[in-house]
Amino acid sequence: MKMYPFTRFAPSPTGYLHRGHALSALWVWAAAEKYGYQVHLRIEDHDQSRARPEYIAAIREDLHWLGFQWVHESIQSERNSLYATALENLKTKGLVYACDCSRKYLFESNSINEAGEVIYLGNCRHKELPFSMESTIRFKTPHTTISWNDLRLGPLSEVPLEQCGDFSLRDSTGQWTYQFAVCVDDIDENIGLVVRGEDLRFSTARQILLMKELGRETPPLYLHHPLILGDSGLKLSKRQRAASLRAERDLEITPEQIFGEICFQTKLTEDSRPISLQNALSLVSKQLDSSF
Ligand code: GLU
């Protein structure tokens, strides 16, 4: 029995699932089967200003329509006390501080990284501002290099301080950030394998760092999968107005057609003929054989 027996599929209910999610789910379930993990469905609704209940119900329905099953489920908005306790631990260890920098200051006086995030240079680190619900809470990022072996991309390393500086754990509207909630959850939910899109690989070093401070010495294994690009060459996303899976279903497009096309788009097949979920999973699994 593994010490951390779960992997997770963690969509944000800020819109309906689209083909990008279908591809991600394929990689999660294929890796789960190949490496012996069970799948946990995590609804990442930490951003309550964008999450909507109807999207949560739709996530379950759309995943079932595609043919995926999971063993456990959690919803971030029901886990506030867990995040609050984790933050208290970091406060006790002196690893966080309050920040009152304005958005204007953040974007005008700091560099921006390739993902469009502010590299926060620690303007408030030594001010000892009081913690309040209106202050942003930041992590005192140490100057260290984090290395890991991605199951698909091989050895990677990152220096979080240079990449993003002191990143935030809770914002000035009281919402937990993705970086913080995901670490608390990956620990609490015994996640041993994280499978997600390549666009998120830049979050991995800071998550390994933060998880260590939250008490998890051995980070999960990471696997970052390729993305489907839309017509504009950008990642398929809700903001890029990708067609939702349910809109496709209403047009009587089948899961097999969707799997056939996304496998072709990500070079797993040589044509876009419809294929079953089981065959699509085997193709991803085979691809993993030739990875690191
Ligand atoms: N909630 C993120 C998304 O929908 C996934 C985050 C993760 O897997 O770490 O893109």
Image (cartoon, helix red, strand yellow):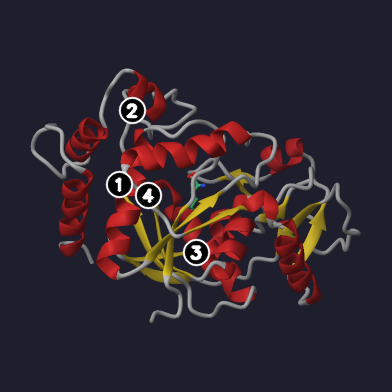
| Of the two numbered discs 1 and 3 in the rendering, the one whose residue sits closer to the viewer | 1
Q: Residue drawn at (55%, 34%), measured in percent from left and top?
A: 55
Q: Position of residue 194 (x, y in %)?
A: 42, 61
Q: Quadrant of residue 87?
A: bottom right
Q: Residue drawn at (68%, 49%), measured in percent from left and top?
A: 77
Q: In the image, is 123 to the left or to the right of 143?
A: right
Secondary structure of the residue carrying tag 1 is loop
Residue beneath label 1, please?
226
Q: Mark 1–mark 3 contact, CB under 8 Å?
A: no
Q: Check the picture and name the quadrant holding the C terminus.
A: bottom left
Of the two numbered discs 4 and 2 on the same chain, state the one appearing first in sequence. 4
CA–CA distance in space, label 1 to label 2: 13 Å
Residue beneath label 2, please?
230
Q: Position of residue 160 (x, y in %)?
A: 55, 62
Residue beneath label 4, please?
198
CA–CA distance in space, label 4 to label 3: 13 Å
User: Which residue of the protein is positioned furthest toward the left in this rendering?
Assistant: 270
| Of the two numbered discs 3 and 2 in the rendering, the one whose residue sits closer to the viewer | 2
Q: Residue drawn at (87%, 58%), measured in percent from left and top?
A: 131
Of the two numbered discs 4 and 1 on the same chain, state the one appearing first in sequence. 4
Secondary structure of the residue carrying tag 2 is loop
Q: Nearer the viewer, residue 267 or 117?
A: 267
Of the two numbered discs 3 and 2 on the same chain, state the one appearing first in sequence. 3
The amino acid type found where label 2 is placed reads Gly
Vertical side of 260 occupied by 32: above or below: below
Of the two numbered discs 1 and 3 on the same chain, state the one appearing first in sequence. 3
Residue beneath label 3, please?
205
CA–CA distance in space, label 3 to label 2: 27 Å
Q: Disc 1 beta carbon < 8 A from ligand 1?
A: no
CA–CA distance in space, label 4 to label 2: 15 Å
